[in-house]
């Protein structure tokens, strides 16, 4: 999955919108004003990433704590969330090593985790549209 495919998939989520609160280089994706993903180009100077992110787009995704750790064990392109709560967020490096379906599943899970914490009324309005 490349950055454009990821962006389209993220924006296809019900009521998903893109913001740029950190400048033009970092896309932040929200549903009902709650962030469920970021997308940016890694420059290789990030601490603790051993240059893995250099030249690759990266997605930060919310994740269940146990699943977050498991995904890091399974995929070398999944690391603790860069600039995020490392227990609840993963950074997925879009280097071609993870199957597209798996990345889509991670995006779906991130979106649903955020939606599950919303009020019942907000959840209901999203379910009507999906």
Image (cartoon, rainbow, N blue to C red):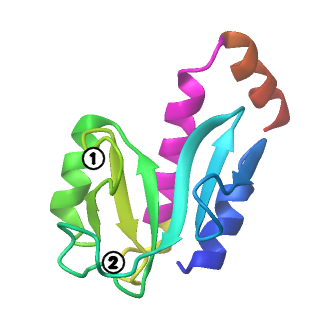
Task: Give the labeled residue for mark 2.
Answer: 53
Residue 129 occupies quadrant: top right
Provide the secondary structure element on which disc 2 rests: loop
Q: Residue furthest top?
A: 120
Tell me which numbered mark, 2 or 1, is placed earlier along the sequence: 2
Q: Residue furthest bottom?
A: 55
- Where is residue 10? Give x, y as percent: 65, 57
**Which residue is rendered at x = 27% and y = 43% of the image?**
67
Task: Give the labeled residue for mark 1.
Answer: 68
Q: Using the image as rendered, state which of residue 58 and residue 112 is in the foreground.
A: 58
- Where is residue 107? Give x, y as percent: 52, 53
**Magenta stretch contains residue 14:** no
Quadrant location of the C terminus in the rendered image: top right
Left or right for 33, reference 63: right
The boundaries of the magenta stretch are: 102-119
Against 117, residue 64 (above or below) is below
């Amino acid at each position: 999955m490349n950055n454009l495919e990821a962006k389209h998939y993220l924006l296809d989520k019900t009521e998903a919108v893109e913001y740029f609160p950190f400048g033009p280089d970092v896309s932040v994706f929200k549903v009902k004003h709650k962030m469920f993903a970021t997308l940016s180009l890694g420059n290789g100077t990030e601490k603790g990433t051993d240059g893995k992110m250099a030249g690759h787009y990266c997605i930060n995704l919310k994740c269940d704590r146990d699943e977050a750790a498991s995904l890091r064990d399974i995929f070398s392109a999944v690391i603790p969330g860069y600039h995020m709560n490392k227990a609840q967020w993963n950074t997925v490096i879009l280097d071609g090593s993870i199957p597209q379906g798996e990345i889509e599943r991670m995006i779906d899970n991130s979106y649903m985790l955020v939606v599950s914490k919303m009020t019942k009324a907000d959840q209901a309005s999203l379910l009507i549209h999906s």
